[in-house]
């Protein structure tokens, strides 16, 4: 079985989860492991696509969507993972992964499974968010007490528990995929 493991990561949270997944599967399947920023050419076809990205505005970040479109990932078997600013059991995390799943289903992909965990919110981006909140109090990422709580709770993620969960997730996904 030939697998593509591809990730999009701005501040390395998703990259770290992708590396944990890679470590788990590299001896089990033939896998190409790529950072989408470094891949400009058209890729071959794979039996399974494991695609990781970060949450922006409650869905997959734009670069990942662009990658999926330019690589024409349609009618494929996919497993999806994300990192986001909120705890994984927060409704916003559920909405975000569901939006990513729906986006992939709209392209006729067969979504086998999904995984999401929290990732540290970059302090630099908070400065930008503060300025934008000052300009527009309805700014989508406005800095309020809720946002500050997310920032605080995100500081230690992704952690060892997140990596363990990601490894278990991909193990279970591969096991059930092999049974199909
Ligand atoms: C511009 C920007 C927008 C973001 N929007 C959201 C969001 O809508 N919801 C959320 O939960 N996290 C949001 N985040 C937080 C990131 O998704 C989170 O920190 C993620 O782990 C970053 O992954 P990376 O380190 O791989 O880039 C945003 C971060 C940035 C920089």
Image (cartoon, rainbow, N blue to C red):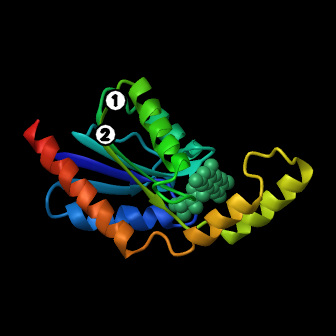
25 or 4, which is in the foreground? 25
The residue at which mark 1 appears reads as 109
Q: Cβ of disc 1 within 8 Å of ligand 1?
A: no
Estimate the x, y position of residue 1 in percent, counting from the top left.
14, 46
Q: Quadrant of ligand 1?
A: bottom right
Q: Disc 2, disc 1: CB below 8 Å?
A: yes
SS for callout 2:
strand
Of the pair 3 and 144, the residue shown nearer to us:
144
Quadrant holding the C terminus: top left
Q: Is residue 65 left or right of residue 5?
A: right
* Residue 128 appearing in the image: yes
The quarter of the displayed image where residue 74 is located? top left
Residue 58 on image: x %, y %: 58, 43
Q: How many marks?
A: 2
Q: Which of the labelled discs sits on residue 78, or is there none?
A: 2
**Residue in the picture at 51% in, 60% down:** 87
Outermost right residue: 135
Placement of 71 over or under 40, stated as above or below: above
How would you rate the neighbour count of disc 2 (Cα within 10 Å): few for under 14, some for 14-19, many for 20 or more? many
The quarter of the picture where residue 46 lies is top left
- Neighbours of disc 1 within 10 Å: few (<14), some (14-19), many (20+): some
* Cα distance in 3D space between marks 2 and 1: 7 Å
Q: Residue at x 48, y 51 (%)?
A: 53
Question: Which residue is rendered at x = 42% and y = 68% of the image?
Answer: 16
Mark 1 lies on a secondary structure that is loop
Give how far across and how far down residue 82 sits, in percent: 45, 52
């Amino acid at each position: 079985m030939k697998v593509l493991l591809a990730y999009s990561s701005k501040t390395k949270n998703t990259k770290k989860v992708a590396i944990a997944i890679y470590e788990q599967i590299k001896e089990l399947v033939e896998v190409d492991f790529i950072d989408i920023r470094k891949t400009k050419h058209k890729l071959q076809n794979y039996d399974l696509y494991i695609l990781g990205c970060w949450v922006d505005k409650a869905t997959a970040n734009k670069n990942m969507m662009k990658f999926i479109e330019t690589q024409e990932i349609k009618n494929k078997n996919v497993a999806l993972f994300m990192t986001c600013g909120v705890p994984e059991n927060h409704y916003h995390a559920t909405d975000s992964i569901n939006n990513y799943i729906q986006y992939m289903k709209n392209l006729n992909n067969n979504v086998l499974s999904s995984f999401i965990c929290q990732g540290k919110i970059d302090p630099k981006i908070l400065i930008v968010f503060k300025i934008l909140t000052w300009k527009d109090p309805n700014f989508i990422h406005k800095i309020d007490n809720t946002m500050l709580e997310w920032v605080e709770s995100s500081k230690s993620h992704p952690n060892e528990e997140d990596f363990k969960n990601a490894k278990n997730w991909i193990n279970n996904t591969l096991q059930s995929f092999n049974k199909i």
